[in-house]
Amino acid sequence: MLIAVLSDIHDHLPNLRAALADIAKRVDDDGQPVGALICCGDLNSPFVVGELAKGFQGPVTVVFGNNDGDRFRITVNAAGTNVTIAGETAVLELAGHRVFVHHFNDVGAIVAGAGQHDLVCYGHNHESLLRRTASGGRPRAIELNPGAIMGWRPGHGEVPATYGVYNTNGTAAIHDALTGAELTRVDD
């Protein structure tokens, strides 16, 4: 199963639409499309929920980020759609893989080090990161910060808009949201 992960949209709809279009083209080794979408927070405005629901047909799980000010309207907009608002933290089981989702990179790094999950996803700092963790009894866990769909990083200015894809076969990659190019990869 493929799981797409994105974060830090900050209302940047053109980059979000490009990422969702690229995600829609991805298939696993068996020809199956991406089965779930995770958003690690900072949608910003409630209307972004509609873009996620319209742009991805499968289940979407969203956690809040520090810039999601109107949490009530974000939650209301998700009602009756394929988007689940999980609060500040989500713990999911997808295709037998335990997945932890949070917005803040410092929290995500601590959880990844605990070794209780197969995949730990987070955002916040707008810097993509993909690596295996080797502590806590799950030596092959993957830590994934997809970077920012917004395409901007504090202190650095414009950076590529990026998202991640985790494959339950044990691999993961970071992709450029505008071109689809693979920027970094972790293999089994």
Image: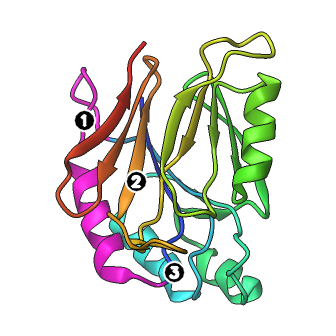
Three-letter amino acid code of the residue under disc 2: Tyr
How far, Cα to Cα, is label 3 from label 2?
A: 14 Å
84 over 158 or under it: above or below: above
**Label located before the other in sequence (2 or 1):** 1
Q: Do the residues labelled 2 and 1 touch (CB within 8 Å)?
A: no
Q: Is mark 2 on a helix, strand or loop?
A: strand
Residue drawn at point x = 25 percent, y = 68 percent:
18
Residue at the disc numbered 1? 27
Name the residue nearer the viewer: 174 or 39: 174
Crowd band around label 3 with a 10 angstrom C-alpha radius: few (<14), some (14–19), many (20+): many
Q: Quadrant of residue 141?
A: top right
Crowd band around label 1 with a 10 angstrom C-alpha radius: few (<14), some (14–19), many (20+): some
The total of numbered circles placed on residues is 3
- Residue 19 within the segment the image draws in magenta: yes
Query: Which residues fall within the magenta stretch?
Result: 11-33
Residue 160 visible: yes
81 over 26 or under it: above or below: below
Q: What element carries label 1?
A: loop
How far, Cα to Cα, is label 2 from label 1?
A: 15 Å
Residue at the disc numbered 2? 163
Residue at the disc numbered 3? 10
Viewer-nearest of discs 1 and 3:
3
Give x and y (percent) for residue 91. 75, 42
Three-letter amino acid code of the residue under disc 3: His
